[in-house]
Amino acid sequence: MRRRIELVDEVGTAFSYTRVVSNVQIRRRCDVDLPPLIDILARQQAQTQYPFQWPPDRGPEHFLRRPTEIEAWVADLAGNVVGHVAIQSVASDELGHMWAAALGVPIIELRCISVLFADRRLARRGIGSALLARATERALAGGGAPVLDVVAGHLDAVSLYLNRGWQEVGRFRPEWLPSSQEPVRAMILPKPEPAGPPSCGSTPPAGP
């Protein structure tokens, strides 16, 4: 079913387009995507508190494109950039060791899903979920172990991760987090349990 989606910009001007929402394109991020992504963050940061500090210490472009980045994608809807996610390598620090111990893997195998956000004017349309799914799939495809961290007060994000099977394994307090805030949650995507041998007396598969 085709749905008409209307967006309203900061001065109240409406613009709209018709699109099958499930057909949001998740594609690799390009340099030309950075300005519209920064616009999204700047427009909604006062409401979302993401990033927690605005503008970020090293600037919004550095927040999006980090030295530890492995891959990054955007959500593209009818030519409009409406979301972002990236995968980062993980440092050998307190947080990295916490994740590695919880998963039982070396830090080098960890893949941190980060900088995940979507345009709130299109909230609850599955854009964030689609971005998370792509990043998780790519992290696993390379034999990596997906991990992430999230500010405890970002309840929508916490709910999204918990509903997708992520588990909290600890909390930590980065330098930029005010003492009035709860510690940041460290989360992992548990490894699937290996399939066990067939139980005694189970029926063997039928032959050809």
Image (tube, helix red, strand yellow):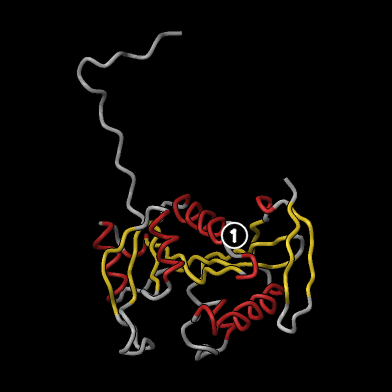
Q: Which amino acid lies under the numbered mark 1 shown in the image of this protein?
A: Ile
Image location (x, y in percent) of residue 29: 64, 67
Kindly give the residue lying farthest to the left in the view shown: 200
Using residue 78 as the reference point, say whether residue 96 is left or right of it. Answer: left
Kindly give the residue lying farthest to the top in the view shown: 208
Image location (x, y in percent) of residue 2: 75, 49
In this picture, is 111 found above or below 49? above
The residue pinned by badge 1 equals: 127
Q: Quadrant of residue 16?
A: bottom right
From the viewer's side, name the closer residue of 122 and 78: 122
Image location (x, y in percent) of residue 118: 59, 68
- The quadrant of the rendering that contains the N terminus is top right
What residue lies at 51% left-to-right and 59% top-to-bottom? 132
What residue lies at 66% left-to-right and 80% top-to-bottom? 39
In this picture, is 202 found above or below 51? above
What residue lies at 64% left-to-right and 77% top-to-bottom? 40
Using residue 33 as the reference point, say whether residue 100 is left or right of it. Answer: left
Q: Quadrant of residue 24?
A: bottom right
Residue count near mark 1 (Cα–Cα under 10 Å), binned few <14, some 14–19, many ≥20: many
SS category of the residue bearing label 1: helix
Q: Quadrant of residue 144?
A: bottom left
From the viewer's side, name the closer residue of 176 and 8: 8
Using residue 23 as the reference point, say whether residue 64 is left or right of it. Answer: left
From the viewer's side, name the closer residue of 116 and 111: 116
Count of residue discs: 1
From the viewer's side, name the closer residue of 85 and 68: 85
